Image (cartoon, grey):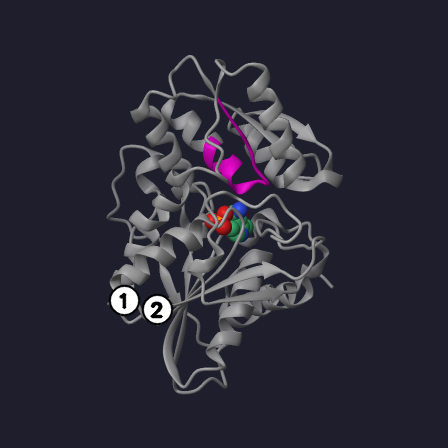
Amino acid sequence: MTTKTNCITAAAGVVDLVGQTPLLRLHKVTVGLNEGVEVWAKLEGYNPGGSVKDRPALNMIRCGIESGALTREKTLIDATSGNTGVAYAMIGTALGYDVCLCVPSNVTPERFKILNAFGAELILTDPGTGSDGAIIKAREMVAADPDRYFYPNQYDNDANWQAHYNTTGVEIWEQTSGRVTHFVAGIGTSGTMMGTGRRLREYNPDVVLISGQPDSPFHGLEGWKHMQTAIVPAIYDPALCDQNLEMNTEDAYAMAMRLAREEGLMVSPSSGAACHAALQIASQIEAGCVVTIFPDDAYKYLTEGFWTE
Ligand code: PMP
């Protein structure tokens, strides 16, 4: 299952390294499951920008260039809780486009430094208003000067979920040789679930799709959205999923720690939550191949207290 992570990879630019991430079988945290049950995690931290968001960011930029909406004179602007911003900033630098990001001011110091290193302009918004406050700010800036900006708007842009339809879903199908029975993913913009889920259902209409959401509006699952209280992304179709699981932050932190201690994997809180949800599903079935997404690794979250508690 090794893909681009070996030494035979040759790439003309960092954008060529997006996608083709490894799919890893979890062996330790799965102890106690029925013998016929497998749990696999797609390690999106292996993308060059360090997260799953490299895929939609690259596709939205490519579609913008192709449609003529993104030209050299324009600045790419968007609201992002972090990973999409890193992806825009990295890809913008690599392809030669200016990037401006509206980000809640409580963004982790690591992320702030990464965005700054890639040369993005940062507009800091009130942390009390969360990612929605950043969205409102980006909309205001675009409305005030529409000709200056290219606004991909990841929450409403079909190129977001289509990136996963064209890559993540295909990779999972191929990496499992078509054996995947359940797909579990947390919902932020919902692009990962909408695109990957639709593709897997096309391959096999019986694939079960399970979304994960935080169990309260105030949570530590960075990248996930509490849909009941948030601005609902236009690309989100709740009818696609068979089931939705509400995950709590403490369980996610505990699972992230277990993944480090037991599997040797340093992954983010939202990966811990996805793993917890996948194991919950896996514990309810007799046999099957459960696949989930680990959206990014742990290195941007090391200031979180739970690593040392
Ligand atoms: N986890 C993390 C860490 C993320 O950055 C994101 C993206 N917001 C997600 C999960 C959810 O992915 P999506 O936006 O595709 O629903």
Q: Which mark is residue 250?
A: none
Q: Quadrant of the C terminus?
A: bottom right
Q: Which residues are magenta?
A: 76-88
Q: Decide which of 190, 31 is in the foreground and name it.
A: 190
Q: Dot 1 lies on which element?
A: loop
Residue on which the image places disc 1? 204
**Residue 163: quarter of image:** top left
Q: Quadrant of the N terminus?
A: bottom left
Residue 108: tell me if it is visible.
no
Q: Residue 233 at x, y = what percent?
A: 52, 44
Disc 2 residue crowd, few under 14, some 14–19, many 20+, Cα 10 Å? many
Q: Which residue is drawn at the image coordinates 45% and 44% (left, top)?
A: 53
Residue on which the image places disc 2? 207
**Residue 128: quarter of image:** top right
Q: Amino acid at mark 1?
A: Asn
**Gap between marks 2 and 1 measured at Cα:** 6 Å
